[in-house]
């Protein structure tokens, strides 16, 4: 050999050593923590509110409370299939696409790139709620140009209904979707045939060509589908001009919000952990990531800008549609929970299935999301029960399992071990502090905290803003 080279080992490369003469340059190892410089990344952190069960936990109410002093309230995923109810001064608001924080006239509402937008539904929702006090919403709403127009197209909703019928005929069981077009919309997105807000606003002729191709693809797959392509395009052209003033580059908008003057930024999750496309009770789930990772991908923000993550837990458990439900009470107890809690879906009006609180399920949600604290809602619905059960353990083939099964057939077979707690048999609706609650209700909350190792920050005892007890 004409010369010699010292072989660089993986360790020496990662530490900066490359062989040769001269002093070895000291460089940090790959993955090593950066040198401390203050208290972490500079800029504003986001506070996140997420559902910890199968949705309908009361996230909108918690978001409404936190948004009172927020500067920016964001939606990061989902679409018109979400439904959040907020009651302010005896006025009830129902939101599906708009963040619940739109009621706060001092806050900006942001719909991120992870949301699929049904434009007719967006404007109908705004017009319905503006009569109740959300007027001027356009001037304080921003929509990401990267958001998909998935369920905008009426044929996405039609396809959703056809697919549900096919599942029922072929397998005898549908998924129980909202039939709002969410699944087909995300399918278009994943297959890279979807259309986005930026496409609609750029060159309408090019957009029209892509739209016709997408419509034809659906017609070929579903021959019975009736699509008036030209009529839909005419409608889209009108909506394009209505929405244009609201649209901004979402990534740049969020970057400026994080790195600009001090701001309180709130993120409102839609759906919930057990409906997450990756971590939920698949296939009976939604089509997006409703866990904390969806905040980063749906808004385009780095993970270290996520601050507090609050999980919202109903004091019992509900589920809309089909799918496994280990603590379901298909009996008088379930009927009483359903009746007292007025458990009907905001989006579909479907009757919700009801059962006891399942802490195995909530602990699984905590494993994924890392909740900083919890909001326990609708505690008052349990006021009439003499005893209250809480699911604390799953057994499979008579053996305790320390995890939440991924497979639905296995989950169907689990036997739930319950902790029986005493009821309080009196109204909690007028309680405004933890001390106002009866001792048994206090014990119920403390049991939840001890089991999960997560503090409870808020307790809901009614529908209105004032019916929330703040513990710290």
Image (tube, grey):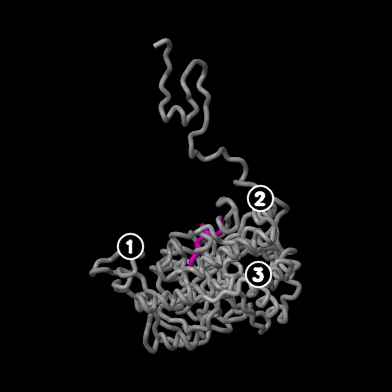
- Give the label, 1 or 3, closer to the camera: 3
Crowdedness near tag 2: few (<14), some (14–19) or many (≥20) residues, C-alpha within 10 Å: some
**Residue shown at 69%/58% (left/top)?**
203
For the N terminus, the image quarter is top left
Q: Is residue 412 left or right of residue 61?
A: left
Bounds of the magenta span?
286-296
Indicate which disc residue 402 carries.
1
Q: Is residue 366 above or below residue 30?
A: below
Q: Is residue 276 left or right of residue 41?
A: left
Indicate which disc residue 258 carries.
none
Q: Secondary structure at mark 3?
A: helix
Q: Which residue position is annotated with label 3?
A: 233
Residue 21 visible in image: yes
Mark toward the start of the polypeptide (2 vs 3): 2
Of residues 426 and 34, which is closer to you in this image?
34
Determine the CA span between mark 1 and mark 2. Answer: 39 Å
Q: Which residue position is annotated with label 2?
A: 43
Q: Are marks 2 and 3 in contact (CB under 8 Å)?
A: no
- Residue at the extreme left: 397
Q: Secondary structure at mark 1?
A: loop
């Amino acid at each position: 050999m004409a010369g010699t080279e010292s072989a660089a080992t993986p360790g020496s490369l990662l530490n900066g050593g490359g062989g040769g003469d001269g002093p070895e340059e000291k460089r940090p190892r790959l993955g090593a923590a950066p040198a401390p410089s203050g208290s972490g990344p500079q800029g504003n952190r986001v506070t996140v509110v997420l559902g910890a069960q199968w949705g309908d936990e009361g996230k909108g109410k918690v978001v409404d409370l936190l948004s009172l002093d927020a500067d920016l309230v964001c939606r990061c995923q989902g679409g018109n299939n979400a439904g959040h109810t907020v009651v302010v001064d005896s006025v009830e608001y129902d939101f599906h696409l708009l963040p619940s924080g739109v009621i706060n006239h001092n806050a900006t509402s942001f719909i991120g790139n992870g949301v699929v937008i049904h434009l007719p539904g967006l404007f109908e929702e705004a017009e319905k709620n503006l009569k109740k006090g959300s007027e001027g919403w356009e001037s304080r709403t921003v929509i990401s140009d990267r958001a998909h127009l998935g369920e905008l197209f009426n044929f996405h909703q039609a396809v959703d209904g056809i697919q549900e019928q096919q599942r029922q005929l072929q397998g005898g069981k549908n998924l129980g979707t909202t039939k709002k077009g969410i699944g087909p919309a995300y399918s278009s997105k994943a297959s890279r045939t979807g259309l986005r807000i930026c496409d609609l606003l750029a060159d309408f002729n090019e957009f029209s060509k892509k739209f016709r191709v997408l419509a034809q693809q659906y017609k070929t797959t579903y021959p019975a589908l009736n699509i008036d392509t030209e009529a839909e395009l005419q409608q889209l052209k009108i909506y394009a001009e209505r929405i244009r003033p609201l649209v901004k580059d979402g990534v740049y908008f969020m970057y400026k919000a994080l790195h600009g003057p001090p701001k309180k930024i709130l993120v409102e999750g839609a759906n919930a952990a057990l409906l997450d496309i990756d971590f939920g009770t698949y296939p009976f789930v939604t089509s997006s990531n409703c866990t904390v990772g969806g905040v980063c991908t749906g808004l385009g923000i780095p993970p270290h800008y996520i601050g507090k993550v609050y999980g919202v837990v109903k004091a019992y458990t509900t589920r809309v549609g089909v799918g496994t439900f280990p603590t379901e009470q298909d009996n008088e107890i379930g009927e009483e929970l359903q009746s007292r809690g007025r458990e009907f879906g905001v989006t579909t009006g479907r009757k919700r299935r009801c059962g006891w609180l399942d802490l195995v399920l909530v602990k699984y949600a905590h494993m994924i999301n890392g909740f900083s604290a919890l909001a326990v809602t609708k505690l008052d619905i349990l006021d009439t029960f003499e005893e209250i059960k809480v699911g604390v353990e799953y057994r499979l083939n008579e053996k305790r399992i320390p995890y939440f099964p991924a497979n639905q057939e296995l989950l169907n077979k689990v036997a739930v071990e319950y902790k029986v707690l005493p009821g309080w048999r009196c109204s909690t609706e007028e309680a405004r502090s933890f001390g106002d609650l009866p001792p048994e209700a206090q014990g119920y909350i403390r049991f939840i905290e001890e089991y999960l190792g997560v503090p409870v920050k808020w307790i809901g005892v009614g529908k209105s803003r004032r019916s929330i007890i703040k513990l710290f």
